[in-house]
Image (tube, rainbow, N blue to C red):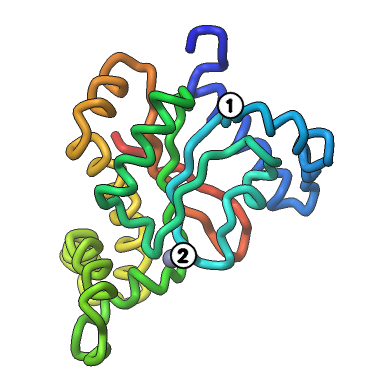
Amino acid sequence: MSTRHSPKQVLDALLAANRRFAEGQARHPRQSPRRRAELAQGQTPRATVIGCADSRVPPELIFDQGLGDLFVVRVAGNVVDEAVVGSVEYAVTALETGLVIVLGHADCGAVKVALEGRRHHRFVSFSLSSIATAIQPAVDRARLEANGDSARVMELAVRYNALIMAQRLTERSSILQTLVRTGQVLIVPAVYVLETGLVEPIDQG
Ligand SMILES: [Zn+2]
């Protein structure tokens, strides 16, 4: 891992590329047939992104990356379950991606479902409600803090959801816990703002 860029350097590079995308200056790098052919020999992605399935938040586009650059796990509400933990463990051990971004986003439908609760979604399936259940701790925390301001509740719930899912990665994986402690892996919760196109890391201090 030592020959590669540090997780912090990769984060800075991705945030710079995101600003390019936000300003309409995306370069769409590394998407040529040549790059595709090179990658047939194997992948060395520079970062892992856990993002929402929402069609407006494709990590490769918003970070202006190409083929083979990002190891992406997408699931509604960027919910971290066993399959997601396992996917990230694979990325950091087999592919040695030191940076893991947990990317929530404004106006997230999964967070809305969790906020509105069962009374608005009477015909919800067990599978869908399992996503809402996973997001519930973020919603509860947001409600406590927002004092009845509904726009603020939504904003905070998105934020806390990214934060809690990032924490869940180390809570549920001793491999990730160790790699984070030794500084080999950096896990960064962040929120994508639809209007600006900017990714804003969440301060965990
Ligand atoms: Zn979403």
- Percent across and percent down for residue 122 are 22, 91
Instruction: Work out whether residue 167 can be spotted.
Output: yes
Q: Give SS at disc 1.
A: loop
**Would residue 104 be found to the left or right of residue 153 on screen?**
right
For residue 84, above or below residue 177:
below
Residue sitting at 78 percent across and 39 percent down?
Answer: 29
Please tell me how crowded label 2 is: few (under 14), some (14-19), or many (20+) other residues with Cα within 10 Å.
Answer: some
- Which corner quadrant of the image does residue 147 belong to? bottom left
Which quadrant of the frame does ligand 1 lie within? Answer: bottom left
Residue sitting at 56 percent across and 17 percent down?
Answer: 5
Please tell me how crowded label 1 is: few (under 14), some (14-19), or many (20+) other residues with Cα within 10 Å.
Answer: some
Residue sitting at 28 percent across and 74 percent down?
Answer: 128
**Would residue 44 be found to the left or right of residue 78 on screen?**
right
- As shown in the figure, which amino acid type bears the numbered disc 1? Thr
Disc sitting over residue 106 in the figure: 2
Which of the two discs, 1 and 2, labels the residue nearer the N terminus?
Answer: 1
- As shown in the figure, which amino acid type bears the numbered disc 2? Ala
- Percent across and percent down for residue 106 are 46, 64
- Seen from the viewer's position, the closer of residues 35 and 145 is 35
**Would residue 61 be found to the left or right of residue 71 on screen?**
right
Disc sitting over residue 44 in the figure: 1
Mark 1 or 2, closer to the camera: 1
